[in-house]
Image (cartoon, rainbow, N blue to C red):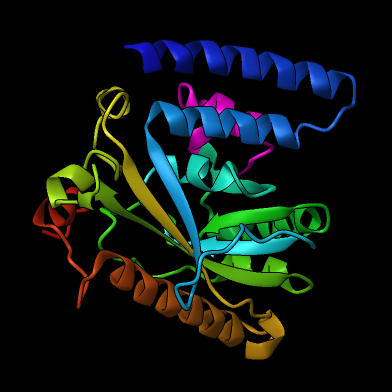
Amino acid sequence: MARGVALVVGVAIGATLIALARLCRLPTAALLRGLHELILWCFNLRVHWRGAAGEALAPPGSAPVLFVANHVSYLDVFALGASLDASFTAKSEVAGWPVLGKLATLQDTLFLRRDPRRAREQVAVLRTALRKRSHVLFAEGTSTPGTMVEPFRSSLLAAADEAAIVPLTIAYTHYDGEPMTDAERDRYAWYLPMPFGSHFLHGLGRRAARVEVTVHQPVTLAEFGLTGAGRKACAQHCETVVRGALLNSLGLEREIVPTHYLEATGRG
């Protein structure tokens, strides 16, 4: 209950301060990261950053890059946003979601409509944004149960023709100090047609959960070729390294695709 109240009050105050800072043309990055840290506290999520070789490290920063990550939950945004000075890309429907839509707007999220006919326009928008600030792209185009990786989409990678691409792996690994069970992970993983409201509320006030974010070696699109085939090869590379780190973080030999996820996506 206390964390729920803190969430409501904190988001209201944070949104007001961010709006005032923008009105006065003041930087908002620190305010946004603080808001994300508050939300992580409300969900009792502990984020641990590590390199691909397993070493602990600070979140990357410097010149703008395109972070390409797997997607488990709306909580991924807070796990990454509390440390990265980066905006996110999201499907256009997210703008209208309660709470999350407002938060996404506050952090300059790029809302892109899923329409192949507008792919060139979307790439141009993201390319322009990358010249100013790093962006996070959830390349699967959907969220998953957290024990698998869906195929990475390649079209938006064309926007990174002048920026490095850094794959990230997000893994929800432990609950209350013990490896997460599938049932516990479903308290954090969220994908349609799960109801959002009850899932969000049930996540508040739980015991501590660990999220591991693995940072992989940066690559450039030029390494694979500035063509459609090159983009697909780059996407495949990112997908492969992200999947490998996910399995390593979870201690799995192979991906687990839950039956209820297959049924939810019409593949069961």
Say which quarter of the image contains residue 268: bottom left
Q: With 18 as the anchor, is 44 left or right in this view?
A: left
Q: Nearer the viewer, residue 233 or 115?
A: 233
Q: Position of residue 125 (x, y in %)?
A: 74, 53
Residue 95, placed above or below residue 219: above
Check residue 165 for magenta coloring: no
- Which residues fall within the magenta stretch? 93-111
Q: Which quarter of the rendered picture does the N terminus lie within?
A: top left
Q: Nearer the viewer, residue 163 or 57?
A: 57
Residue at screen point 46% across, 27% down: 97
Residue at screen point 49% across, 45% down: 79
Q: With 148 as the anchor, is 231 left or right in this view?
A: right
Could one spot residue 7 in this view of the protein?
yes
Residue at screen point 26% across, 33% down: 207
Q: With 71 as the anchor, is 22 left or right in this view?
A: right
Check residue 104 for magenta coloring: yes
Q: Nearer the viewer, residue 31 or 226?
A: 31
Q: Nearer the viewer, residue 89 or 113?
A: 89
